Image: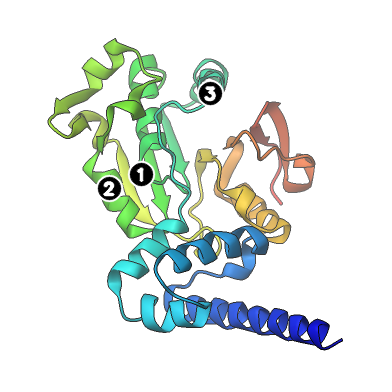
Amino acid sequence: MNRNRSYEQREEAASLDYESFKENIKRKTGIDLSLYKEAQMKRRLTSFYEKRGFHSFQEFFNEGITKDEAVLEEFLERMTINVSEFYRNPKRWDVLSDIILPRLSSDTSRLKIWSAACSTGEEPYTLAILLKERKLVPHYSILATDIDEIILKRARTGLYPERALKEFSNQVVQRYFHKEETGYRISEEIKDKVTYRRHNLLADTYEAGFDLIICRNVLIYFTEEAKQSIYEKFNKALNIGGVLFVGSTEQIFNPDRFGFKTEDTFFYKKVKNL
């Protein structure tokens, strides 16, 4: 009996510790951890703070995040799901190149594109290279956003290890990258096509008028309620006929609920305003 009571007390204390941490993080950073799947997030952050030598979320916040800029920056990086290579999942990019982009380009001379939760920039730069190679539309703009300014700084730098380029042909690498001592730097003509900006998908307002939104491999970390809210906001951000491109584990099973219909696997065409 006493052991059970002791276990329940520890569980209650751990729960209160995390609840207090969520409130503190929201006040400090604007990040609402209650919109992320709790079990996954707690595991990731517990592993992080234990490696840093902290013993609770309260200590992690008070002695780490509040007092040490490096800990805060690393915490924000943990909130970003880093994509590690260009042209990730090539078959999906082939569908984008061969089916989606030609349709979107068929009745306009300008495309407005958003790479949401873009991490270190491989995704928007891949898209810029695709558009350059295919010459489908003369004018386009690519907005790339992420919650972490440190990650965005790395994206703006445009320097990548050789392994990140493994899905590109040698010809593409030679055309759009310059080899340096520490890696491969993307060319200025591609870099200039992408505008980077900090944006919190869960809290910030969304621009409108997009023809294509790419948001891959981040929605799986959010609660169902948060995902539904994001799908609704994506609907409002897209033009009629515009497309939402999601990750390979993020299939939308009821797209009509959010004003979409499936155009291809993991591609959802907006058919009506909500």
Look at label 2 and name its amino acid: Arg
Front position in the image: 196 or 11 = 11
Nearer the viewer's eye, disc 1 or disc 3?
A: 1
* Residue 187, percent from left and from top: 20, 29
* Residue 182, percent from left and from top: 17, 35
Contact (CB < 8 A) between labels 3 and 2? no
Q: Tell me which label, 1 or 3, sits earlier in the chain.
A: 3
Name the residue that disc number 2 marks: 154
Name the residue that disc number 1 marks: 120
* Residue 214, percent from left and from top: 52, 39
Res. 138 visible in picture: no
In the picture, measured across the screen, residue 204 lies left or right of residue 179, that is right
Name the residue that disc number 3 marks: 96
- SS at mark 3 in the image: helix
* Residue 54, percent from left and from top: 44, 75
Contact (CB < 8 A) between labels 1 and 2? yes
The quarter of the displayed image where residue 252 is located: top right
